[in-house]
Amino acid sequence: MNIFTLLKKEVLNSVQKLANEALINKMPNTDRVTVEPPRDASHGDAATNAAMVLAGQVSLKPREFAELLVKELQKLPAIESVEIAGPGFINLKLSNAFWYEQLKTILKEKEHYGDSDMGHGEKVNVEFVSVNPTGPMHVGHVRGAVFGDALAGLLTKAGYQVTREYYMNDRGAQVDKLARSAYLRYREAMGEDIGEIPEGYYPGEYLKPVGQYIAQKDGDKWMSVKEEDCHVYFRDIAVKMMMDLIRKDLDKADIHFDVFTSERAIGESGGIEKALKVLEDRGLIYQGVLEKPKSAKAPEDWEPQEMTIFKSTEFGDEADRPLKRSDGTYTYFTPDIAYQYDKYKRGFKKLIMVLGADHAGYVTRLKSAVKAVTNGEADLDIKLVQMVSFSDNGQPLKMSKRAGTFVTFADLLEQIEKDVVRFFMLTRKNDSQLDFDLVKVKEQSKDNPVFYVQYAHARAYSVFRHAEEMFGKDILDNLLNADMTLLKDESELSLIRILSSFPRQVEQAAEANEPHRIAYYLYDLASAFHALWNKGRDDVQMRFLDEKNKELSKARLALIQATTNVIASGLKVFGVVPVKEM
């Protein structure tokens, strides 16, 4: 459990006791009470603003209220000392016995330590990747894929019921180009010289297998048929084969989806009309002419036309948005509204989309659409993922197949182990620039967070192996029975405090939809563990194992086991397997 949530309950119980005993004139509203780590660690283990936010409600000065509250808090066995700071803040120092109990909890819960019920089982839809099915995934898609999967893992750990969803943009101009390109590759597979692939088509060789597949399956059946007459057939096969390619790439990174939703299927089922009917019934659609866009500099760049328009400015957007052009065709925006409405109708009110940073201009209009079509019942959070700068030993990597350098997701995973890719992609906040050097991500140094965290876990297991050699294999059995009170050094207690803060880190990261916070935490934890290891090298009294003191060794093994539990728990959020040897 989040120890600060636990302490907050104790603070609120103490306030209730003051009210029950008429030491204050009523039970105040406690919604604004917080218990958090103090900004300065020297002030204690936790701080609460209870006196500051409650005193006025019971006609007392903050310090007067604090003095009453401190008397109650001092009675708690978990509290070693309490002091009032400034006008009424209360700092709490927790007893060593409290920390030893937290250590036992970590040992009991193993990789489940940090699991939270914060989400109360609420359904969450996390849509990510959603690469157009017009070719294999390239390296530009890696970060969004890893981020989305880790975010889903984080929310699951925080107690949400998460659905990972992939939205297939399988209709529209891009897919039509794909079908025409596949048709050319079919004719090529049948022996025809198709010459240069026309501009605007997809020239990639990844479409050759599509043409070959249809040629083997159907022979010359389509050779005398115009492309437009077999367009749908080629489109459907090409999309399916491209999605199979994408799935294979995702499988290599151990990224899997619960749902694949088809844009075309939503359209063919009348989903677009249903969504527009909802907006129309709420008076949010009108016929009109939009103002000339700023991008249209010359008169010939823009022609005023009457269109069907959504009143998105009523929901915070900077401009109303067209839904239907004057010729009756839908704009690019309209199917996206239908898709969000489809998710809402499936029971999702908490929606998360992971998009590339180039979609920044799309955020406000999509959020406004979700508010409108769900009548404010659903909330959409859009996480923008910045591009990754790839390099090889400091030299910028040119994304060119002709130059022999990789361009696909699969190629990257052939060069760098998937767990390294997954972890490294989460070492920066999603909207920050990330540099990925093919050489540096493999470096065995403190500057490489992937190595540093995994090395801590592997180091711990080297201690376990040494302990079994020294004391026998049963030394690691029943570490819960170790005498934790033997862990008295401040560096040992400090490590326990860091371990015990993990549940709070999980909840804060989940609340902000920011899995990179777990990466930061794991690095700090690894740093504390490595520091404790190095302390034992300098001071024989601090070595993890002492052949002459089995009980102390067992207590320290319990601390090390707790460390591996938390590292494994954090890495599991990222879909990364902790290593036992390096």
Image (cartoon, rainbow, N blue to C red):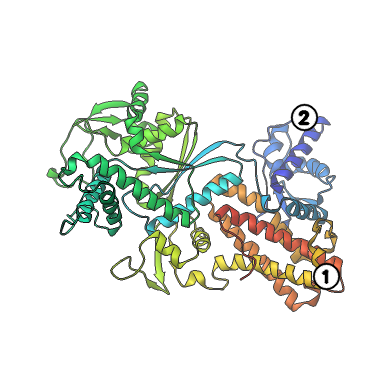
418 sits left or right of 507 in the view? left
Cα separation, mark 1 vs mark 2, equals 61 Å
Label 2: how many Cα within 10 Å (few below 14, some 14–19, many 20+): some
Q: Is residue 19 above or below residue 417?
A: above
Type of the residue with mark 2 = Asn
Q: Which of 252 and 28 is in front in this view?
A: 252
Residue shown at 69%/42% (left/top)? 52
Residue 431 visible: no
Q: Picture coordinates of residue 223 (x, y %)?
A: 17, 47
Q: Is residue 554 left or right of residue 405?
A: right
Element assignment for label 2: loop
Q: In the displayed structure, would residue 290 be above or below residue 95?
A: above
Q: Mark 2 points at which residue?
A: 25
Check the picture and name the quadrant holding the C terminus.
bottom right
Query: Which residue is denoted by mark 1 in the rendering?
Result: 471
Spot occupied by residue 56 in the image (x, y as percentages of width and height): 69, 35
